[in-house]
Image (spheres, rainbow, N blue to C red):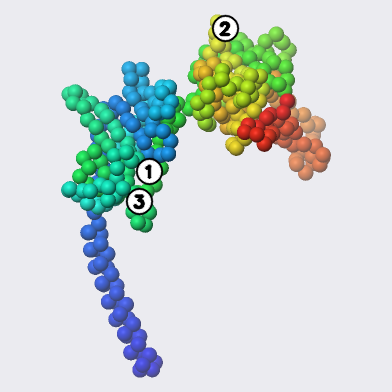
Amino acid sequence: MKRNTLILLLVGLAFGAYLYFVEAEREVADESDEPALRYVVDFPTDEALSARIAVGEGPPAHIEKTEDGWVSWDEQNPTRYEADEDWINDFLELVRGVQGTGLVEEGAVNLSDYGIKDEGPSIEIHGKHAAGAEWTRRIVIGDSTPVGEKLYVTNQDGNAVFLMDGYMRGQLDRGVANFRPRRLLNFETEQVARIEIAHHAGEPFALDRIEGSWKVSGNGEALVDNTKVDAMLGDLKFLVVSEFTFDKLADRAPEYGLSSPTQTIALKDASGAELARLQVGDRVEAASGDYYVATNSSDEVFTVKPAAIGELPKTLEDLAPAPPKPSMPEGSSEEQSPANVPADMPGESEDLSDDSPVLDDTNHGAIPN
């Protein structure tokens, strides 16, 4: 090895060692200088009684605990809607868990320097301690930091400015729909003694539960698969709202295709009382393809995902038992494989019907009759 090459190699190794030790010490120093995370607000979530949420572009939303449970509404629509307690608790825990990733300034702070204003985006929560003392907690959101990844925030005291991760604003932005229960129908499957189904694709029919088995009403010869019927009841029980329209059925039924529903399913108990009813409109939401639906338990129009509606039986044939498999000739071990099926024979799972909605170019899509 030439002398000059050796000298350059030694210099390079020495410089690399220098950088390693210097940067290692700097990293330790940086870690020690990093501010500890601090919660912006703290409160007992089980003592919260109400909140006002004004974070997004929509009207401020309110939640309030009443004797009958939580309700929600917004400042443009005074209608009180039932609120799901689990959604409420999740939101309160989210607010309580907001952390300041850094302390910008503390003491006599000029909040306007950080875009923090009383009328700005905020969340205000009110509650009462067990001893009777009332309390208020508030998060106020200001401008973004110059790099745009953080937000300046303060609390009800207003004597400190924290940094909050920018994505938290989207998580804190809640409206009335975020708190409403999404279960569409409320019934117990064991109470269902009669099912009535009507769809434009076929004749209406009814099923009665007799000694634990489902029978076709008025047709003793027709058979149904009990497993399919029970699966349908399970699908109905766990059917969820996709979107809330906040429109009254009586005011907008023709617009949503619910004046003459394409399908109606009614569930009744042994006395004939209606437990639940689902009506599916003959129009769909143009952008998403969601079906407009109505129920017996609400005067509102909702939307439901097309996959969920597509699973529901439309005719009696949809609930019929599967045909028995043909028996093989005696002594034959050959099974019919896909290779042995004629090319023009459809597979058992192939759906040759076209019952999918066709969208028009108006606000709502029409389902062809």
In what element is the residue under mark 3?
Answer: strand
Query: Could you tell me residue 116's position as x and y percent?
Result: 29, 45
Q: Identify the mark nearer the N-term, 1 or 3.
A: 3
Residue 230 visible? The answer is: no
Compared to residue 13, the image places residue 367 above or below, namely: above
Numbered marks: total: 3
Q: Which callout, 2 or 3, points to the residue nearer the camera? A: 3
Real-space CA distance between mark 1 and mark 3, rounded to the nearest whole angstrom = 11 Å
- Tag 3 residue: 144
Query: Could you tell me residue 99's position as x and y percent?
Result: 29, 45
Q: Residue at x 32, y 17 (%)?
A: 67
Q: Residues within 10 Å of mark 3 (few under 14, many from 20)?
A: some
Q: Residues within 10 Å of mark 2 (few under 14, many from 20)?
A: few
345 lies left or right of 146: right
Identity, as a three-letter code, of the amino acid under mark 1:
Arg
- Tag 1 residue: 169
235 lies left or right of 343: left
- In front of the other: 204 or 168: 168
Identity, as a three-letter code, of the amino acid under mark 2:
Gly
Quadrant of the rendered structure where residue 326 is?
A: top right
- Tag 2 residue: 272
Q: Can you name the residue that lies furthest to the top here?
A: 271
Q: Residue at x 32, y 43 (%)?
A: 141
Compared to residue 317, the image places residue 359 above or below, namely: below
